[in-house]
Amino acid sequence: MSKFRQGALCILIATAFAGGAIAAPCSGPQADAQAITPGTPLTLDIVLEQVRGASPDVRRAALESQARKADSVQAGRGFNPSIGLEVENFSGSGPLAGFDQSETTFSIEQTFQLGGKRSKRQQAAQANATLGAAECAVILRETELEAALLLYDLLAASQVAGLAEQAADLADTLLETVSKRVEAGAAAPPEQSRAHADAAALRAAVYQARAAVEQKRYDLAALWGSSEPRFALPDIDRTALSEPRAGGRREETHPQIAMAAASESARRAERDVARASLMPDLTVSAGIRQFEESGENAFLVGVRVPVPLFDQNRDAARAAGYRVDAERLNRLAVEAKLLASQRAAVAQVRAARERLTLLEDAALPAARSAYDASVQGYAAGKFDLTTTLDARKGLIEASMAVIAANRDLNAESLRLRSIIGAAPFDGDFQ
């Protein structure tokens, strides 16, 4: 690859992250994210703002990216000259005793890099800096997706906790109905004990559901380095996702594509450095020598060139070429994998939506109708307690299935958006 094409590729990759808020965490010094006001209902906007401004993983990657930029500047520095002072033929024996016969040499030495080593080394460092920015963007995208998924996990957990409260209330209501029937002699006393045990078990499940909600809250807060979740539960109305458009973005805009291309470019630059090392460097020295015996001076000029007799760096150049081939294969594999993932995600979103529609429109209403009828039938003595408990279990399972299906739809939609670079992963908040 020519220097022009190599430099153009680096610029192209860098500009892929230059627009929008997605580039900000990785392109320069980060400002701390604004702290969440205690009790604020959590939204997707708030979650992404915290991740982009306060995630320890993202901040660490951003600092590494800045460090590589500093390395690229350092790589362009030339070698420092050397200054030497040498005194010969003194403090010996006979005529060489003392300093009368000594010779003093003052010299300056400079090594010149041949074969374009300096420029190629700087290009390699710049390519590595571009790779660092691309790696940061990948970490940012992955952390954003993880946080968004956790948000909808938290939302689902809170809905499950609410459903557990409703189930416990239904059990208490049924217990009252059973108690009245037992007092009236219309039901056997064991039915009351059974209903009481069932109500206690469902009430205990409420505490378990609440604990799951707290666990999700702490997991989410930990993503932006907080040990204490100060936010309230998610706002359901403000966490709804619109339908993503799979054709809205090209797969090449995904950070993993840019990282694979940047990695290939960096390996190419390293190969160029290894090839340039085949050319030996030239060291030139110049100085002045003073003869104490005669008081005369003389100039000195020297040239040194290492002889590549045993090591010509050819093996390193060959190894660098292999790494370029490996990175080219990796880039093609990443492109194919992302394309396959996008198509699979589209299918998953479609299936999740159809499943949710079926559960909401058919399964849940039928289960609710069956439970209402069973409760009325039991109160009138038409059904036994087992039938009523089974109907209530069916209602709870149908409600749980709706929550799970809604969560799956949101999760698959987020994964698709992450792949195609759609909102909220395009750097803009919804």
Image: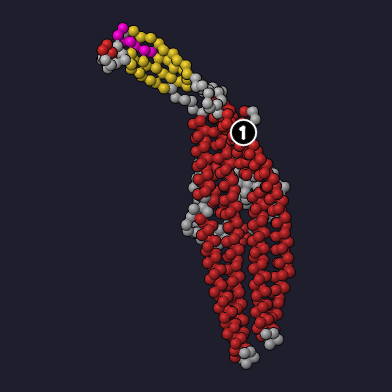
**Residue 114 place in picture, x, y as percent:** 54, 22
Residue located 57% across and 37% down the image: 130
Residue 28 in sight: no
Compare residues 84 and 7 and report the one nearer the observer: 84
Q: Is residue 99 above or below residue 172?
A: above
Q: Quadrant of the N terminus?
A: top right
Q: Secondary structure at mark 1?
A: helix
Give the image location of residue 24, x and y in percent. Answer: 56, 43
Mark yes or no: residue 219 visible: yes
Look at 67% across and 73% down and name the residue there. Answer: 395
How many marks are shown on the rendered structure? 1
Whether residue 93 sits left or right of residue 423 in the image: it is: left
- Which residues make up the magenta segment? 288-294
Left or right: 243 in relation to 154: right
Residue 137: x %, y % from top left: 58, 44
Question: Which of 78/310 is in front?
Answer: 310
Quadrant for residue 177, please give it: bottom right
Residue placed under numbered mark 1 in the picture: 321
